[in-house]
Amino acid sequence: MHVSGFYCVQGQGCPGGQIQLVAIVQPDNFDVGNYDVVFYRGNMAGPWTQVARVTGWGNPLGGEFNVTATVPIVANPAFPRWYYGAQDVGEPGQGTPKSLDWSSVPMDPSGTIVADPSSGKAPLYVYFWVDDHNSSIDSIQWQFGDGGTGTGNYIGHTFNQAGNYTVRATITNECGKSVQLTKAVNVSQPTCSSPYGTEGQTNCQGTTLKKCQSGNWVTIQENSQQCGYVPPPSPCTNPSGESGATRCDGYALKQCVDGQWVTIDPQSQQCGYQPPATTCSNPSGANGSTRCEGTTLKKCQNGNWVTIEQNSQQCGYVPPKSPCTGPAGDHGSYACIGTDRVMCNDGSWDVIMEDSPLCTGTASCSNPSGINGATRCVGYNQMECRNGEWVIKQTNSPDCGYVPPGNGGTSDSDNTLLILGVAAVAAVGLGAAAWYMGKKR
């Protein structure tokens, strides 16, 4: 008799389980007595190992019959499958079965973390993925070393503080076998150039004292004596006074600045000025009271509303933050222009990744980019990223600095100006994006 066919009952298994092997035995003419069938396991390029031997009685008149064996599944460190076969011990070429089948066995997971970039200045955005060595990864859990976590093979993370971080990725195969990979990410303090300085350091530029904040030199004090400024020693005359002294000239209050008398209040009550009792109308206001017209702060003086400050934050004005245009962004922030991932660097957008996965999906909003569900302010309106589009979540939102009229806030006419302003900002953003794409070509 001889083995005429063979198959494995299941196509895949995990180490620790079992697999059933079936050999189809064909009796030869006039066969009588017992048979011995040996089952083998091995790789196509390697030796065969005996895993089971079955002995029984054949029926020479009954035609083909099956011989089965159940063997344990073991890990295959060299190949993601085992080949199995069977052979009658009396057949020639024993040890090299002719009828074969195979069953896959997931290999132990392995790989390497790739970080792009792996070092830089805070805030540092890093894009991570795992270079899979044997295509055995079923899931990945990330720990970024700063408290942040995530899942998936491709993932981005921003490190806001300087430090040395150990990023860990726990990769698991289909059989539940896990391996942890690590990657070092070094985040340095933002630096200021011309002259060079680290975060928090002060520096003199002429007689102006400046401080390095988030990579930019910010003026702390002009005419700083720490930077060598010497105030003029000359006094003010007619009458004489030391620098910084004050005097009255009629109703005007004056101060001695650099040897000259400078008016600091033309109608000072300290100098005897009595304001008229008239009130301001539309809306009415007592002399000396203040109110907001849009983002302009005004004061009632002599029955008239006089502008005290344009673009007043007291009236809800939010100064522009970003030095980058098309689209706007703060220094060190990230955005999408087309499918390119860009970073705001000293007022210019630098491309850090072309055709970035963060910019090609349908779940992000552009100009500026935002993850689905993120919010931002356009004027007093709070916007939310929904299915890749910015939509208004709340008009005149307190979270965006809006204060109701009567409390130093806006009027209906101001809201009209705000809506026109939002449209203008959107038009500028679209124009800047078109300029960038034209420049890229």
Image (tube, rainbow, N blue to C red):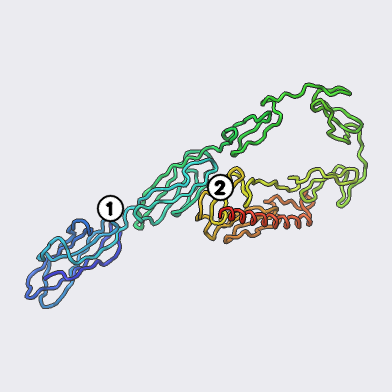
Q: Are marks 1 and 2 in contact (CB under 8 Å)?
A: no
241 is higher (above) or lower (below) than 58: above
Residue 177 as seen in the image, left or right of residue 439: left
Residue plotted at (60% across, 60% down): 389
**Residue shown at the point (32%, 53%) measured from the top left:** 108
Quarter assignment of residue 64: bottom left
Q: Residues within 10 Å of mark 1 (few under 14, many from 20)?
A: few
x and y, in percent, of residue 400 in the image: 68, 51
Determine the residue positioned at 27% across, 53% down: 78
Quick check: 148 above or below 87?
above
Nearest to N terminus: mark 1 or mark 2: 1
Badge 1 element: loop
Q: Residue 7: x, y in percent? A: 23, 68
Question: Where 117 falls versus 274 (above or below)?
Answer: below
Specify whether 423 is left or right of 273.
left
The tag on residue 344 is none
Callout 2 environment at 10 Å: few (<14), some (14 to 19), or many (20+)?
A: some
Q: Mark 2 belongs to which amino acid?
A: Asp
**Taking the image as drawn, is residue 212 in sight?**
yes
Q: Secondary structure at mark 2?
A: strand
Up-down relation of residue 361 to residue 34 (above or below): above
Kindly identify which residue carries mark 1: 77
> What amino acid is at disc 1?
Pro
Residue 170 at x, y = what percent? Answer: 40, 50
Query: Which residue is tagged 2?
Result: 350
